[in-house]
Amino acid sequence: KINSLILEIRAAHTEMMAALEKDASREELRAKHHSLHEKKAALMHEKSEGMLDIRDVLTPEQRRKALVRIQEKKGELCD
């Protein structure tokens, strides 16, 4: 599901850029932006649900380690 959403987001982004290049109407651009936004929200929802599913099967120690890793990765992205 996540991979298909990623592909949909890429396609929606490509459509948005094409609409910008062809000087589409304001309403058309709003519709494309809304579609892109909805797809991104769906992707975030799926990722969150996946993390919760994984969390459900981890021990407290594994959860702690996973949280540390997430925080470390977040720090790497901010650097």
Image (cartoon, rainbow, N blue to C red):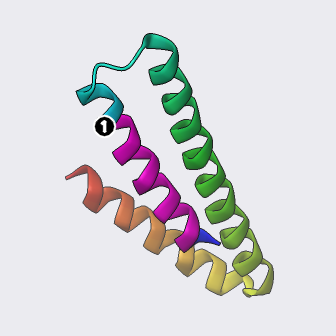
Residue lying at the far left of the rendered structure? 79
Within the magenta stretch, is there residue 12?
yes
Residue 54 lies, in percent from the top left, at 70, 80
Say whether residue 33 is left or right of residue 1: left
Q: Name the residue type under label 1.
A: Ala
Magenta span: 3-17
Tag count in the figure? 1
Q: Residue at x 74, y 69 (%)?
A: 52
**Main SS, magenta residues:** helix
In the rendered image, the vertical position of residue 29 relative to residue 78, given as above or below: above
Q: Residue at x 38, y 36 (%)?
A: 16
**What is the crowding at mark 1: few (fewer than 14 residues within 10 Å), some, or many (at least 20)?**
few
Quadrant of the rendering where the N terminus is positioned: bottom right
Residue 34 lies, in percent from the top left, at 57, 30
Q: Residue at x 62, y 64 (%)?
A: 47
Residue 17 lies, in percent from the top left, at 30, 37
Q: Which residue is mark 1?
A: 18
- Foreground pick, 60 / 35: 35
- Foreground pick, 44 / 58: 44
- Foreground pick, 49 / 66: 49
In the rendered image, the vertical position of residue 46 relative to residue 12, given as above or below: below
Residue lying at the far right of the rendered structure? 56
Specify the quadrant of the image occupied by residue 44: bottom right
Say whether residue 42 is left or right of residue 18: right
Within the magenta stretch, is there residue 13?
yes
Specify the quadrant of the image occupied by residue 25: top left
Residue lying at the far top of the rendered structure? 26
* Badge 1 element: helix
Q: Residue at x 53, y 73 (%)?
A: 3
Residue 26 lies, in percent from the top left, at 44, 12
